[in-house]
Amino acid sequence: MTLESDGLNSQTGPESPWRFGRYLRWLAIVPPMLYLLPLVLIRIPGYESHFGSPFAPALEYAFDAAGQNADIVIFGDSAAMINIDPVQMSSALGLKVINLPNTAGSLSVTGDIMLQNYSRHNKPPHLIVGYFTLHSLDYLHRKAIPMVYEGQEMLVDHGAFAQNMDFARSHPSDFLLFPLRFYPTTVVTLVRTLASHKPRSQTVIAGQGHFDPMSTHAAFPSGPCQLPLSGEDFPMDSAREFRQKYTTPQTAVLVYVSPIAACTNAGLVTSQPFAAIPAATPRLLPPSSFKSDALFPAHLMPAAVPGATAQLIEAIQKALPATAK
């Protein structure tokens, strides 16, 4: 027993510090590598279209729109992505329409960098439409940013180093948590993609920027409803600045507020000073036209998209410069 015990000690004793040090080296190398890996993977071509967050294919499409040379460019939040059909618009207007959509989160993080990128690689359009929901009219000055991950994806992939550092200084916790949010988001998207057998990027391209990852969501309950409003004012500074920034002798700008549900307190919205942007008062649609995907209904059911698109076409026909008609 003594000899065997001594033999065991002679074999494991000297190796224990080496093994302990090896484990420490692995712990010092592997976790940082896994933490930084998302910053590399996201920049691989095609990653966003196949493995990014649910809205990533449409957001990526906006950055890959070089050479489109559209006559009308739509820019806005997720309502612009879901509620409007650019193919229908192109057919009705006889002009090429393209959508460069965002989400509420990406718009607050990346601002208009995708529209700037589009402007560098395409001729000036006749008209730019800023299509925003009520809560996105001041997207540049939000204190709390919803769904920030979607915007960070685009910022990491397409933003300059200085832009990423600006975001890190203003939102340090979101900046540090981004790699940790990457893995569960990617796994969920991969499972959904494999289950659907549909290439998401091709759907976006065929729709000229129209994309509805929530197409199967149920409709907002019909009958009496009340919007979660308490009479507050809605800042509109970003929409006003957007119009001023992009209006040129070659390009007109139309700010369009997405429709809202015709609930009992909708007057709290329609009484807002939209003419100051300027923009028309948002249209009222039946509550059942909207998805029940949020507390405040903003995204339309697929059956309501043609009608909402026709309303936008009507507004565009009035706003188009005479040379484009």
Image (cartoon, rainbow, N blue to C red):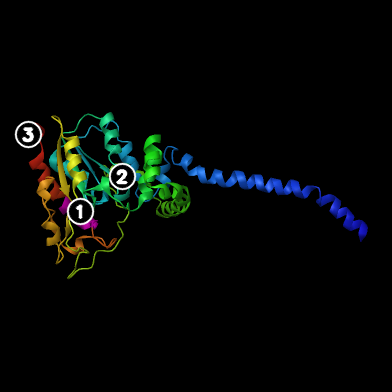
Name the quarter where the C terminus is drawn: top left
Of the residues under marks 3 and 1, which one precedes in the sequence? 1
Name the quarter where the N terminus is drawn: bottom right
Of the residues under marks 1 and 2, which one precedes in the sequence? 1
User: Which x, y percent locates residue 277?
Assistant: 13, 45
Residue 29 image-quadrant placement: top right
Q: Is residue 302 magenta?
A: yes
Three-letter amino acid code of the residue under disc 2? Val
User: Which x, y percent locates residue 309?
Assistant: 17, 49
* 61 and 206: which is toward the camera: 61
Of the residues under marks 3 and 2, which one precedes in the sequence? 2
User: Which contiguous range is marked in magenta?
Assistant: 298-308
Residue appearing at x 32%, y 49% in the figure: 105
Q: Would you call the spot at circle 3 few (<14 residues within 10 Å), some (14-19), or many (20 or more)?
A: few
User: Which x, y percent locates residue 83?
Assistant: 22, 52
Q: Is residue 221 above or below residue 25?
A: below
- Residue with the most extreme bottom position: 224
On the image, numbered disc 2 is attached to which residue? 204
- SS class of the residue under badge 3? helix
Disc 3 to disc 1: CB gap under 8 Å: no
- SS class of the residue under badge 1? helix
Q: In front: mark 3 or mark 1?
A: 1
On the image, numbered disc 1 is attached to which residue? 134
Q: In front: mark 3 or mark 2?
A: 3
* 309 and 178: which is toward the camera: 178
User: Which x, y percent locates residue 54?
Assistant: 37, 51
* 110 and 320: which is toward the camera: 110
On the image, numbered disc 3 is attached to which residue? 322
CA gap between label 3 and label 2 equals 31 Å
